[in-house]
Amino acid sequence: MEYIMPNRLDRGFYQFQKEFEEKAVEVLRSGWYILGKELSAFESEFAEFTGAKHCVGLANGLDALWIAFRVLGIGSGDEVIVQGNTYIASVMGITINGATPVFVEPDEYFNIDTSKIEEKINAKTKAILVVHLYGQASNMAPVVELCKKYNLKLVEDCAQAHGAEFRGKQVGTFGDIGCFSFYPSKNLGAFGDAGAIITNNDQIAESIRVFRNYGSEKRYYNKVVGANSRLDEIQAGLLRVRLKYLKDLSREKELLCKKYLAEIKNSKLLLPQIRDGATHIWHQFVIRTNERDTLIQYLNEKQIGTIIHYPIPPHLSEAYAYLGLKEGILPITEEYAKTVLSIPLYNGMTGEEQDYVISCLNAF
Ligand SMILES: *Cc1c(COP(=O)(O)O)cnc(C)c1O
């Protein structure tokens, strides 16, 4: 068996090769590369897909996060509540603006434990950032309630969960702003960097539209000190191609994961669980094991690659040493960082590849 990588982006390309190539050539030949009709079309199509009123394309997911907090006026002296076990970009989105992250432990679905949020709310708390980690929608009902009760902004990091739903409503539409990344490995992936925000608020959409283009509404007239964070025409066009098939692509991954759930049988491995009322678009299939190092090495010998999402929780990262948070303050987050492992999963994965991964895992 050829080495099985944890992810295969080339397979996702070849699934729609002709359409991607035609679109790229169409944009190249159009002579218009930034802020054009492909972006406008993608923005309307993605807004419609999510059920949000507006979508604004941005250069990447991190920009979506920090620009979201910037236009909400959250910065120095403010606190934002976020789960401890997330990709560090979620936290950077908060701290780039000078705000302070306040970490909450995750639940058994790897998302924020909503029963532990209220104890962290104080006069400085301005927002909750919910991360729909690994592709599963978080438990949104209590979060929405807390945001109402304490008058907090609600931002969602949907970088891993395009199209996931909680009680029939798509992630990104529960609060003020939903932030997306279209980094190539995400379920809706571009062929370079790309991101977007969605919102139902006209004012927020307009502010972000202006902010992403040097704070300018009209060429050379600048209202605010903004950023250069535009989603280019080629990426927007290619995302439009993939978006047409996103439901099918998520379904394909779901079938692969259902097979993993049904056929991986090994008492050393804990399989992911799905919350009642939530859907999972399976950005990653994340198992847990106390014998992670041995498992990684064993799978490597069997020509199977894996990734750890994520080995160092943000509060213990060198980048956040200045927060002064020591090991031991978030035991569940830290335990997950020591035990999680993502096994191979991608669109275009063959039955033969998956059967081999399953039989190796069961023999471990
Ligand atoms: C990928 C990711 C981001 C950042 O997106 P980029 O486009 O890489 O900047 C933010 N949050 C989460 C949870 C992510 O997975």
Image (tube, rainbow, N blue to C red):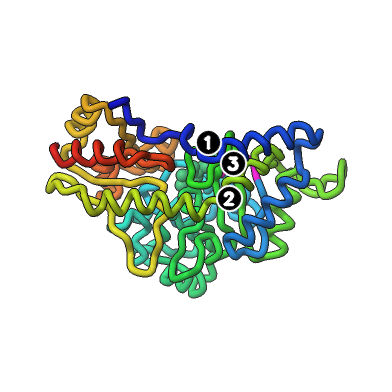
Q: Position of residue 228 (x, y in %)?
A: 71, 38
Mark 2 residue crowding within 10 angstroms, few (<14) / some (14–19) / many (20+): many
Q: Quadrant of residue 7?
A: top left
In space, the residues marked 2 and 1 are separated at their CA atoms by: 13 Å
Q: Which mark is residue 60?
A: 3
Locate the C terminus by quadrant.
top left
Q: Would you say residue 132 is visible in this rendering?
A: yes
Question: Which of label 2 and label 3 is nearer to you?
Answer: 2
In space, the residues marked 2 and 3 are separated at their CA atoms by: 17 Å
Q: Residue at x 33, y 38 (%)?
A: 344
Label located before the other in sequence (2 or 3): 3
Give the secondary structure at mark 3.
loop
Q: Is mark 3 within 8 Å of ligand 1?
A: yes
Viewer-proximal residue among 152 and 18: 18
Q: Residue at x 72, y 55 (%)?
A: 207
Q: Which residues are magenta?
A: 58-62
Label located before the other in sequence (1 or 3): 1
Residue on which disc 1 sits = 13
Left or right: where 65 falls relative to 299: right
**Three-letter amino acid code of the residue under disc 1:** Phe
Left or right: where 64 falls relative to 187: right
**Three-letter amino acid code of the residue under disc 2:** Leu
Give the secondary structure at mark 2.
helix
Residue on which disc 2 sits = 243
